[in-house]
Image (tube, rainbow, N blue to C red):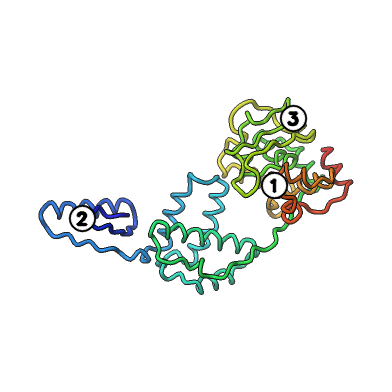
Amino acid sequence: MTVPESLAGGRRVRMAFSSADSAERWIAEKALDAARGEAVAVTARKTSGMAVSELVRVYLSDKQDRIASESFRMLRHRLGKLLDRFGSLPLSEVTPWAGKEWLAGMACAQRTRYGVFVDCRSLWRWALRYDLAETNPWDRMEPQGKGQAKKEILRPDQMASLLGVDWPDWFRAWLVLGAFGGLRTVEIQRLEWSAVHRSRREIFVGADVIKKTKGMRQRFVKILPALLRHLPRHRSGPVVPVAPEAMAHWRRKAVAILEVSRWPQNALRHSFASYHLAMWRDSATTAHEMGHTSTAMVFSNYAQAVTASDARKWWAL
């Protein structure tokens, strides 16, 4: 918070408080002292005294309405790991070496470790921007390796099992738009039915829907016959009009049907890439449908080698 210049002798002074209420009470008390003619001494507090838990709280509050719900849930989950280790400490006690040792000791995949590192680094960069921290220990560490993404796909028989269930329309739409359209989960969550043009056999993924990446800013996705067969019919409103908790609930049911321990990460989009590439053998078209400007992403992060026979089974579902 910036202290009013009238209380700081005409100077601009930044101070950190545990909450907005405590800051407002402090200003009111000092203003009352000044009105009585009493001396008001204002000195800047060391911002590094703020606890990590408080920084995470205000950061998540700022980000909650700025990013997609699924991304926010992931951010909150990763920063929860930070809180478990450093939550009660002041920012000044989170050193590059402490962060390095903590990350190295994480029992998780390298890609998960990288995601935690990136979110922690972004948190401190945000804190620096608003003068809530003095240094960024994560920027002073050597870069973390990203690791190789695990490509998990569904078999045609597994997808057939899912399609045979009487799901809510919005959950079925999520399944088939990912599996037969290649859309990202965040794009499906932002999509409106008005963007689905059955007569033209295409879906418009606009700038307000597409994930903000270095890829395409908008695109048309072809409605292939498999997608047209299984896509529920609606005319208005959001395709997925439910909270993330509802999505997680029905996805757990899908996990039980597949008889696996968890939902395979990005399985629908990975499956689309793999079977689309195997069926049509056109990496440029596959990349375009998925929203990539380069075919390299399809091969490095998404497509898994599948047989032509399985590709035909997938698109015949």
Which residue is labeled 3 in the image?
201
Residue at 30% from the left image edge and 54% from the top image edge: 2
Q: Single out the residue that lies furthest toward the right.
A: 309
Residue at 79% from the left image edge and 47% from the top image edge: 283
Residue at 70% from the left image edge and 30% from the top image edge: 232
Which residue is labeled 1 in the image?
292
Name the image quarter holding the C terminus: top right
The answer to whether marks 1 and 3 mark residues whose Cβ atoms lie closer than 8 Å is no
Residue 139 falls left or right of residue 261: left
**Kind of residue at disc 1:** His
Q: Position of residue 297 (x, y in %)?
A: 72, 53
Q: Quadrant of residue 126?
A: bottom left
Q: Around disc 1, counting alpha carbons within 10 Å, would you say few (fewer than 14), some (14 to 19), or many (20 or more)?
A: many
Q: SS at mark 2?
A: helix
Residue 95 falls left or right of residue 132: right
Pick whichever, 4 or 73, lies toward us.
Answer: 4
Q: Around disc 3, counting alpha carbons within 10 Å, would you say few (fewer than 14), some (14 to 19), or many (20 or more)?
A: some
Figure label count: 3
Mark sitting earlier along the chain (1/3)? 3
Mark sitting earlier along the chain (1/2)? 2
Q: Which mark is residue 7?
A: 2
